[in-house]
Amino acid sequence: MGGRANRPPDHSCFSFESNSMLYFLIRRILAMLLTFWAVSFVAFLIMELPPGDFASTRVSEMSAAGVRVDPEMAARLRELFRLDEPVLVRYWSWFTRLVQGDFGYSLAFNMPVRDLIAAQLPNTLLVDGVTLLFMWVVAIPIGIYSAVRQYSLGDYAATILGFVGVAVPNFLLALLLMWLFYTQFGVVLGGLHSQEFADDRLSWPALRDLANHLWPPVLVAGAAGMAALIRVMRANLLDELRKPYVTTARAKGMREWRLILRYPVRIAMNPIVSSIGWVLPSLISSATIVAIVMNMPTLGPLLLNSLMVQDMFLAGGVLMVMAMLTLVGTLLSDILLYWLDPRIRISGR
Amino acid sequence: MTQRLLLSVADLRTHFAMPDGTVVRAVDGIGFDLHEGETLCIVGESGSGKSVAARSILQIVDLPGRIVGGRILLHRYESGAATPRQVVDIAQLGRTGPAIRAVRCHDISMIFQEPMSSLSPVHNCGDQIAEAVRLSDPRVGKRAAHTRAVELLGLMQLRSPDLIAKQFPFELSGGMQQRVMIAMALAGNPRILIADEPTTALDVTTQAEILKLIAGLQRQLGLGVIFITHDMGVVANVADTVAVMNKGKIVETNRLRTLFDAPQHPYTRMLLASTLRLESPSPNKTTGAPVATGIAPAEPLLSLRDITKVFGNRQGWLDRVGHQVRAVDGVSFDVGAHENLGIVGESGSGKSTVARCILGLHRLTSGSILYRTELAQTIELSGHRRFAGDPIVRDIRMVFQDPYSSLNPRMSVGQIVAEPLLLNDGLRGGALRERVAELLVLVGLEPRMMERYPHAFSGGQRQRIVIARAIALKPRLVIADEATSALDVSLRAQMLDLLLDLQQQLGLSYILITHDISTIRYFCDRVIVMHNGKVVEQGTTRAVLDAPREPYTQRLIASVPRPDPTMRL
Amino acid sequence: MSDDAAPQVALDPATPRLRGDFGETPMRLMLRKLRRHRLARISGVILMFLYGIAIFADVIAPADPNTLNARFTYAPPQTLYLFDGWTLDPHVKGYIVTVDEVAMKRTFTPDPDTQIAVRLFPATAPYLLWGLIPLRHRLIGPVDQRQPFFLLGADRLGRDMLSRLVHGSRISLSIGLSGVALSLLVGVVIGGISGYVGGRTDMVIQRVIEFIWSLPQIPLWLGLAAAVPRDWTSLQAYFVVTIILALLGWTELARAVRGRVMALKGEDFVAAAWLDGAGSQRIILRHIVPSFASHIIAVATLAIPGMILAETTLSFLGLGLQAPVVSWGVLLRDAQNIRTLASAPWLLAPGVAVIVAVLTLNFLGDGLRDAADPYD
């Protein structure tokens, strides 16, 4: 009763799509670079937290912890990274080298940090990527079914699955899975490759072996995220299903499932797509924990190890790489959302 | 004239089984007939079940609603044949399945109240209409469907239909969106069109256009139209036959003229009486005779001089330039003591913004608002800082539009009404309770209601609470922003009478903001017409409403559907 | 006739009305809705039980959590029998210990002949409840305190798992509360300011929050937790861990508060209060806060499990809290080795405790949120 109509159309919003897309992209990339820079402060802070400066104290501590260190290397490092100079200079030298690709040197592994990371990065991307895919492919249909058939048996099962998935800590799930397999099948889960395929990575048997190794961490790392995704999808879709445009589609004479997929699901997906950006940090987090428990050759365990022995260049480098992954993911999700939702595209917000 | 029978409904019952076990009988045994070329209006107030009835016909009632009994007989004809080749009982068809889908695609179409939310926000208009085309005839290819979509948009009297087809619903105005909906509804060449309050959410001028459009299409295509509405004025303008619904039952059905001239059922009579009551000035008005020229009262209570309010002129860094909106653009008028001033306009006219500027809820971009206190002091309201006990806080009060959001759900009624008294008069304890009780009685509520919380009251009662709060400090000027728009017509007159009554007792002035012309006619002495932030015309109610000078005002007045079948738009 | 006298029956089935909600205060209405949510009710009871255990851990645990007993390393759990034949005589069976010299392993089997009588409130070695009150009895235990009593088995140093579990609940559950309390403090203030003041302040704060959100949390926790020096006392470590958790968790609360405050600020009743002459302080405290309090409580309750999980994870990885502090995470650290776990699965008991705590908190929080929501 007595609601109000919209304002007359503003014809000036016939912007050229390509232009505004470019503008949008530039703005987002700039924001991303700014954030990256800000993250470097935090990473550097963490690097600086352990008491004492890098070289001598580290060297002596690490030898005490049983790690062999080359003293000449240490001396050169002091020079190279200006370890005797004030904080800001140290930061600046580290950061400038970082953006040029020089992540520093790992005293624990006796290798440039970059090489270490490069060795683990593809694995990390593989595991994280497959986990993300798995989460989506499983969670979204379950979420849709759960919302459409609300209060059915399937819905309750999915809800319970959702709750349990969120309640069980990642590492516990990993432990349970490993324990189960060990006691029942005598198999030790973990790692990414079996020894015999070390040289022959791309043959079919090697890939099959990879798949065999891949599913436990993917399952565990994805479990909590999947559970959350199911709940979000269900809630979003329930909201959308009540909206008037669904009734209109029904009144047009569309088949029930077809109209659900074409309209409310499509719209309920928007917030989920835009949330990829936020899901990524948590995914990288949970993947880290799982990787540590299951001995995966990825960045997570590398980070933990470096922190344990206070190999700070390595720690800082890994942190920055992880942050970069997150930021790129956020950017991609923003672009995806821009493409999916005309409301954002046209009003440019 | 032997028009063919298209739809015959008998003893239709749609019930909702609620989770707590009760059964809501939304539609409880209704029946009517619809013929070709005929417009049947189903009219009723909120809660009468008219919308559920309309949705039952297409089996699109939201769960847990179900048709539990009755017949909905759809008659299908070969072209030109006098007897139906098939009669289908829609009530038996169920909510899903090819049979009911066939009905939705080919026989009956429906348009809805809120076109913005009834169209998909992520598909463009052309695609949505084309989809309807292809649903009714799957053999049609994509391109052909799109062409037909553009054709249909052209039929809606839209300029540049091909451009509109490419746009998204949120880019269009309400009237255009509704045309898109109608085009979509006609895509399957239906014989029957159900219109569920299609113009309720639109401006009066747009409403007139859409009503004309529907009437024209009906004539052109020989449709049967079922028109759901709550507005007797609309009924008078579109109906051939009228069915009055109340509490799930149809209390009276008749031809239009007969219903208006000689209503049978008491409910119909009450409905008509309430509506017609608002068609002329209230007999309860005892406010001062308007000044002859009707422009400037002698010693105005409030003077607005050339006020302007622009929104959105701040730019964020890394954001695009903010979109600027001149909500109010050089408005000037006066309000006298003991006078009722009405500000009327459509959406976007700036009338609400003016009210909020007077109250200080928005800061003026430029201009001044001068207020004369009782002691003949003049205070500039723009930029005035309010504080407890300030004469401005006491003297100028507001009655809000939405009785649901203007009462704090966590405070009891007593606490809500007591708040201004607490802050300004410093009343406490027993004295406070007494005063609150007094105020509640004054607005027609019982004092014991002060212990209760807003959620326990109906819309009408809540509005009274809002009024009680507004008059608590014995103000001199009360601004009522669409105070009665959310109420049913039967309540509206009551509420306005209450306001007039209070005016007599307390010597108030009112500024009434509304979009509804009949409210102005009933309540106000003088009226200001606003459009796009500017004052278009002002004068006595009589002068402006009966003999408008400006073309916009003329169009506005002419668009209002009068509840009189002899005065069609 | 229009229903001026009675509340309207909602014909929109999406918002069914509760019966008889005439004179109820909003709080009572919310509690009533909560009570209908069976799962939340059960969870509430279980949580009270859990926190009760945490508070009275000293009494409830059969033994001191750090008492070593080298003879009973990895002893399996003993079954508690209530009856001996027909008489009521709670007892557990003793162990037959076989030592394998070659594999250096002990194997325990229950000895059907030894019976260790178990009673409520047996006399034990004196201890202090909460470090203050001297007591000489515990809740349950063997009459002869020198006998082994391991209802949940023993760990690698022969320490009673049940006692450790019970004491661990104290740390794990309380850190959840303190972490959330701190987050709440920071989050409400910052979120409130952001929402109420709006404008540039809001924008800046939003950017900061987005920045924090875009960081991968666990790596940062690991970094911060690793920086906790090993030689700090357990109390200091506890505080630092709490701060770390809160530091990364306040953003979610701040966002929720901001959203709520912004929505409320735009409500007509807030404008009405301002028109009544209320100042900012009164508006915030009297009008806005009561409206979002219940919602924020729900959000806070839902944030506790996250904190518990975080602490558990950190301790499990060896960061943050260390032995001799007993938390569920520290306990689970002993379960890292798969082979050990295979032969002593009772080491996973703390995991069950974590799951139960997190589940019940989630259910309760969900129930609170549902109860608080449809009202506004």
Image (tube, coloured by chain):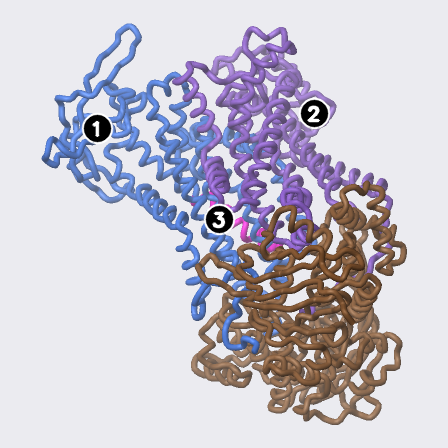
Chain colours: A purple, B brown, C blue
Q: Which residue is mark 3?
A: C300
Quarter in which the N terminus of chain C is drawn:
bottom right
> CB of mark 2 within 8 Å of CB of mark 3?
no
Q: Which of the pair C86/B247 is nearer the observer?
A: B247
Residue C62 against residue B365 in the figure, above or below: above
Q: Which residue is mark 2?
A: A98
Residue shown at 24% from the left, 44% from the top = C133
At label 2, the amino acid type is Leu
Residue C163 position in % (x across, y down): 28, 33
Residue A16 against residue B19 in the figure, above or below: above
Q: Which of the pair C99/C222 is nearer the observer?
A: C99
Q: How many marks?
A: 3
Q: Residue B5 colored magenta?
A: no
Residue C26 against residue C112 in the figure, above or below: below
Q: Nearer the viewer, mark 2 or mark 3?
A: 3
Prevailing secondary structure of the magenta residues: helix
Asked which quadrant contains residue B555, the reply is: bottom right
Chain letter of the residue carrying label 2: A
Q: Nearer the viewer, mark 1 or mark 2?
A: 1
Q: Which residue is mark 1?
A: C149
Quarter in which the C terminus of chain C is drawn:
bottom right
Q: Residues within 10 Å of mark 3 (few under 14, many from 20)?
A: many
